[in-house]
Structure formats: C-alpha cells, structure tokens
Image: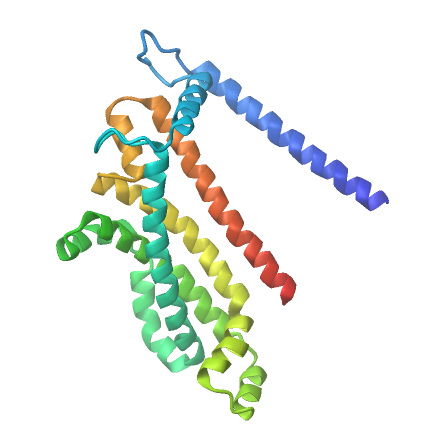
C-alpha cells in the first residue's frame, strides 16, 4: 500500500513538473514574441497566434488549391508515404543482411570496415547522386530514407543474431529444421529485442531525414511546406508545422516502444 502511494505521488510530481515547465516555456515565449501589426509579424509570433494558425491548419487539412497551396494533411500524407516505402525497404534489406552477418563472423569481419565507412555519411549527402541516377525527386527522397534507416537496423540485427546462444542453433540443427523454419522459430525470435531496438532508432532517423530531404526536392511533403511557408514569412505556419512534425515523431516512436515492451515481456 505504501509503495503504491509512493508511486502515485511520484507520478503526480512528474505531471506537475511537466505542466510547470510548459507554463514557463510559454511565459518566456510570450515575453520574447511581438504581436503582429496589420497581419504582419515583426518578430517571433505569440503562442496565441501560433495556436490559432494551428487550429486553422487542422480544421481543413486536406484542401488542394494548387501546387504550392495544399493542406497540412496532404503534406503529411506524402511524407509518411515516402517514409513507409523507404523505411520498409531498408528494414527488409538490413534484417536479411544482418542475419547473414550475425551468423558468419568471417563475413562480418570482411564487410564491417565498409559498413563503418558508410555509416557516418549523412543521408542527405547521397541526394545529388540519387537525383542524377534516378532523375526523380520523389524517389530520391525515398532513397534518402532508405540510407538513413539502413545502418541502425543492420547493426542491431547483426549484434542480436551474433548474441544468440549456440545451443539454440545446435538443437535446431539436430532437429534437422529447414533454413526457413530455423529462421522463423529460433533466429528471429531470439534476436527480436535487438532488431526492434534498431527499428525504433531508425524510424526517428528516417523521419528527421525525410523532412530535410523534402526541403531540397520541393513539390510536396511537410518539409517542403515548412520551407515554402518560411519563404512566405508565415512564421505561425512554420511553428505549427514544426509542432505537428514532432507529434508524428512521438507517435512513431511510441508505437515501436510498445512493440519493444511486448517483445521484452514475452522473452
């Protein structure tokens, strides 16, 4: 009973601290902001102006009035669509290659130097090469997502597979399980926590990369929306879009966080 009361008290303190910090942030923002004059802001817009603009954006998120005037819902849909394609392709390639590397120390040692060279390269550095070879800005952005997602999943998968107890693999060999059954029954379940950790890291990196890539390619996407609104000096729209980008990132991360807890519980 005492422990339960202590936990509730700690949770209440955490919630109150969060609210107080948010109130402090809004106060500092309000003091730093300058109200708009005749519809034009002379500096940082006020929190009220940003919230008003944010409400307008989510009230009609799917309007389409031309190439440079689409609702935030359409822009986010394009970004999430590119994210899903590039991220899914990277997950398939990285998990497949990670399993092979994890099971073969010799191959892992041979390829590891190349992985270490390619891993620290910014995904955006590949954009000119993708634009030159693919000649399509949308698919080039997808490839940027692919490159940003590949390495964390690959490294975690190889680490997780390499850490599987040899007894498990030996038993599966004695039972004469086929390669596919060995993969589905022994290897992937045993390495699942490490794989999901890599997937969770990669989804954050991918979401960051797609916003930056869309600022370069233009056309559609939430990254382009932010850049276009900045060019129009609509700071209220820029800040509102930044908040929405953050909320989508939180939802993506929390989804993989719940998956990681579920897998850890099963294990």
- Residue at the farthest top position: 38
Q: Is residue 20 left or right of residue 214?
A: right
- Write the residue at 34% across / 64% down: 116
Residue 145 image point, x, y percent: 32, 53
Q: Can residue 63 be seen by looking at this rendering?
A: yes
- Is 102 above or below relative to 212? below
Quarter of the figure that contains the C terminus: bottom right
Q: Is residue 174 left or right of residue 88?
A: right
Picture quadrant of residue 113: bottom left
Judging depth in this view, the residue of 226 and 129 nearest the camera is 226
Residue 31 image point, x, y percent: 47, 14
- Is 94 above or below relative to 242? below
- Is 155 above or below relative to 124? below
Judging depth in this view, the residue of 142 and 32 nearest the camera is 142
Residue 74 image point, x, y percent: 33, 37
Picture quadrant of residue 235: top left
Residue 148 image point, x, y percent: 34, 55
Numbered disc total: 0
- Write the residue at 56% across / 22% down: 24
Q: Is residue 60 left or right of residue 220?
A: right
Q: Can residue 122 be seen by looking at this rendering?
A: no
Picture quadrant of residue 108: bottom left
- Write the residue at 37% across / 22% down: 236
Quarter of the figure that contains the N terminus: top right
């Amino acid at each position: 009973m005492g422990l339960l009361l202590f936990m509730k008290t700690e949770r209440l303190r955490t919630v109150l601290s969060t609210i107080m910090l948010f109130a402090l942030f809004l106060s500092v923002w309000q003091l730093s902001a300058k109200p708009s004059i005749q519809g034009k802001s002379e500096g940082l817009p006020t929190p009220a102006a940003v919230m008003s603009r944010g409400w307008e954006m989510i009230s009609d998120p799917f309007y389409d009035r031309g190439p440079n005037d689409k609702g935030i819902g359409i822009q986010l849909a394009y970004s999430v669509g590119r994210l899903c394609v590039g991220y899914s392709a990277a997950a398939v390639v990285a998990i497949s290659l990670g399993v092979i590397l994890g099971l073969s120390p010799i191959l892992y040692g041979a390829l590891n130097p190349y992985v270490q060279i390619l891993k620290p390269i910014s995904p955006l550095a590949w954009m000119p090469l993708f634009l030159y070879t693919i000649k399509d800005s949308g698919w080039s952005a997808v490839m940027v997502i692919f490159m940003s997602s590949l390495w964390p999943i690959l490294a975690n998968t190889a680490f997780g597979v390499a850490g599987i107890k040899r007894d498990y693999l030996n038993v599966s060999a004695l039972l004469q399980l086929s390669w596919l059954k060995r993969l589905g029954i022994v290897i992937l379940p045993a390495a699942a926590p490490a794989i999901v950790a890599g997937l969770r890291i990669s989804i954050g990196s991918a979401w960051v990369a797609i916003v930056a890539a869309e600022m370069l390619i233009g056309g559609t996407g939430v990254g382009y929306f932010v850049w276009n609104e900045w060019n129009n000096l609509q700071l209220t729209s820029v800040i509102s879009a930044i908040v929405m980008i953050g909320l989508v990132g939180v939802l993506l991360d929390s989804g993989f966080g719940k998956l990681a807890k579920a897998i850890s519980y099963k294990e």
